[in-house]
C-alpha cells in the first residue's frame, strides 16, 4: 500500500526525455563557425537557415534554442526550438569526392594551393584556411585525407604536406 501510494506521485515526476524527437535525419552540410567546421543535420528548418543558426549558436547566441552537448556519440550537440531541431554531428554522413586537385565535401570545396588550404562554400570565393599544419576542426578531416596529406599526430588530428 505504501509503495503504491508513493509510486504514483513519482510517475508524474518522471522526466520527459523519452518524448524528445529522434535525431535529425536531413544532412544540410558544413557550417563554418568560430570553432571550425561543423556537420549539420536539421529538421523543421530549411538547410540554409540551419547553417546560419549553427554559426550563431556556436558564437553563444542561442536565442530560443535549447541545446545540450553529448560526448562520444554520433551527435555532438543537439538543439531544439519547438518543432525545429539542429544536430551537430561527430562525423560527416557523406563522403568527400576528389576531382583533380579539388575536394568536395557536401556544400564546401577545398584545395591545396601554394602551401595553404583554401576553402569555399558553394560557388563562393576561395578563402585561405591557413598554412600547415592543418588541424581538425579548422579543416574537416575528410578533406585533409582526400587531399592525401600526411598526418603528423598519432590519431590523425593534424596534417601536413607530403
Image (spheres, rainbow, N blue to C red):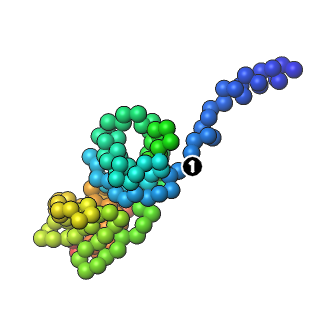
Residue 90 % position (x, y) = 43, 55
Instruction: Please name the residue shown 22% across and 70% down the image.
Output: 111
Which SS class for mark 1? loop
Q: Can you tell which quarter of the image residue 118 is in?
A: bottom left
Query: Which quadrant: the N terminus?
Result: top right
Query: How many marks on residues?
Result: 1
User: In the displayed image of the protein, which residue is found farthest to the right?
Assistant: 1
Say whether residue 60 is left or right of residue 8: left
Q: Which residue is drawn at the image coordinates 82% and 23% (left, top)?
A: 3
**Residue lying furthest bottom:** 100
Seen from the viewer's position, the closer of residues 49 and 149 is 49
The residue pinned by badge 1 equals 22
Q: Quarter-wise, where is residue 59 in the image? A: top left
Q: Residue 119 location in percent, x, y?
A: 22, 63
Q: Can residue 160 be seen in the rendering of this structure?
A: no
- Between residues 49 and 6, which one lies in front from this camera angle? 49
Amino acid at each position: 500500500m505504501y509503495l503504491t501510494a508513493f509510486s504514483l506521485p513519482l510517475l508524474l515526476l518522471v522526466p520527459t526525455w523519452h518524448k524528445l524527437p529522434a535525431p535529425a535525419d536531413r544532412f544540410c552540410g558544413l557550417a563554418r563557425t568560430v570553432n571550425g567546421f561543423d556537420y549539420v543535420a536539421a529538421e523543421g528548418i530549411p538547410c540554409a537557415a540551419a547553417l546560419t543558426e549553427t554559426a550563431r549558436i556556436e558564437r553563444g547566441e542561442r536565442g530560443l534554442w535549447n541545446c545540450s552537448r553529448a560526448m562520444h556519440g554520433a551527435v555532438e550537440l543537439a538543439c531544439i526550438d519547438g518543432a525545429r531541431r539542429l544536430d551537430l554531428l561527430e562525423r560527416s554522413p557523406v563522403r568527400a569526392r576528389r576531382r583533380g586537385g579539388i575536394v568536395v565535401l557536401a556544400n564546401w570545396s577545398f584545395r591545396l594551393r601554394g602551401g595553404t588550404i583554401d576553402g569555399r562554400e558553394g560557388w563562393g570565393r576561395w578563402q585561405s584556411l591557413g598554412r600547415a599544419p592543418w588541424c581538425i576542426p579548422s579543416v574537416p578531416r575528410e578533406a585533409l585525407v582526400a587531399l592525401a596529406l600526411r598526418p603528423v599526430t598519432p590519431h590523425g588530428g593534424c596534417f601536413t604536406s607530403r
